Image: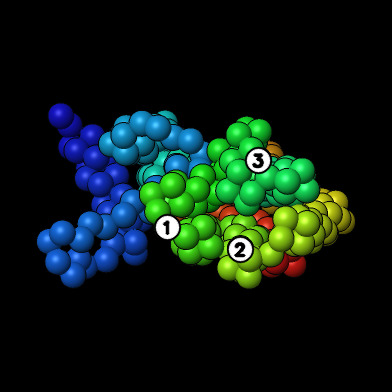
Amino acid sequence: MSGAVAGALAAALAVSCAVFAPFARPPASPAVRVGHPDRTALDDANWRRPLWQWESLRAGCIGAGAMLSVATPLPLFGFLVAGALAPSLIVRSRAAAVRWRARLATTHLLRATEAALRSGASFPEALRRACGGSTDRLARRPFVEALREFDLGAPLDQALRTSAHRAADPRARIALETLAMGIASRLPYDRAGILVAAIADRLAFEERLDEEIRARTAGVRSQVVLLALVVPALAAYLAFTVPSLAATLGQPIGRFVLIPVAAVLEVVGVIASRRAVDGARR
């Protein structure tokens, strides 16, 4: 093994440690285990393979970045950071899309529960029918967990509250807590159907509001991405047409200062614009 390859592997290991260091927590006892930072996103994205295979994929991305840095004049550190973060960014984006579809499916599940209640079914039976007719795994999961605890002897309202505390989506959490209050109040079937309909109407209103915000901000978000792509494209064009600029970017100040700072500013701008839209949707 050459010195360059050994140095690249050591740098990749250092980057991986630096990326996951903020997520580490000192265990209070030997029985406490530190969770993987991507575990929730991987579970929502339906990743069913061991975590070591996921980290092997990350290591492969880091190795590919190291090989690209050897073939290009760009700094090795930037490629290693990009290779280490790219799998997490991709799976988190995928998980966000799956959660968005689960929000829509939750509304349909509540509509099915309302229909079952109005037909005379009990609350547990109505939830079972609705979960059986839903094909979205994330939308069914909190209700299935509550029904499982109910089958084991726990009161249904308490099981729904426990499932609400575990839910990551605030909309699903509000729906579960409201259902738990309705069950604790021992509402008749017709009143329970009205309560479930009110919850479904609220979720539907929030979905329409989210869609309107996304539609109104779609042009702005597209412009942000296009502007972020124009800058590196213009820099590459000028580097080919202006030899002095290419020479400056090829020097250490360009490779280790100008290009990394520009890339960081591009990423920060895109993330800030998306977070602004997500904040308005909340």
- The residue positioned farthest toward the left in the image shown: 30
Res 240 → quadrant:
top right
Q: Which residue is mark 2?
A: 183
Residue 232 location (% of width, % of height): 65, 46
Relative side of 252 to 18, left or right: right
Contact check, label 2 and label 1, Cβ < 8 Å: no
Relative side of 66 to 230, left or right: left
* Of the two numbered discs 2 and 3 in the rendering, the one whose residue sits closer to the viewer: 2
Gap between marks 2 and 1, in whole Å? 13 Å
Earlier in the chain: of badge 2 and badge 1, it is 1
Numbered badge on residue 130 = 3
Q: Residue at x 27, y 40 (%)?
A: 8
Residue 134 location (% of width, % of height): 64, 36
Q: Kindly tell me whether residue 172 is visible in this rendering.
A: yes
Report the amino acid beneath label 2.
Ile
Q: Residue at x 22, y 45 (%)?
A: 10
| Residue 122 in the image: above or below residue 51 | below
Report the amino acid beneath label 3.
Ala
* Of the two numbered discs 3 and 1 in the rendering, the one whose residue sits closer to the viewer: 1
Report the amino acid beneath label 1.
Ala
Judge by depth and name the residue closer to the eye, 225 or 129: 129
Look at the numbered disc 3 and give the secondary structure of its residue.
Answer: helix
Residue 172 location (% of width, % of height): 62, 57
Assign the C terminus to one quadrant of the image: bottom right
| Residue 167 in the image: above or below residue 2 | below
Earlier in the chain: of badge 2 and badge 3, it is 3
Q: Residue at x 19, y 38 (%)?
A: 6
Relative side of 189 to 99, left or right: right
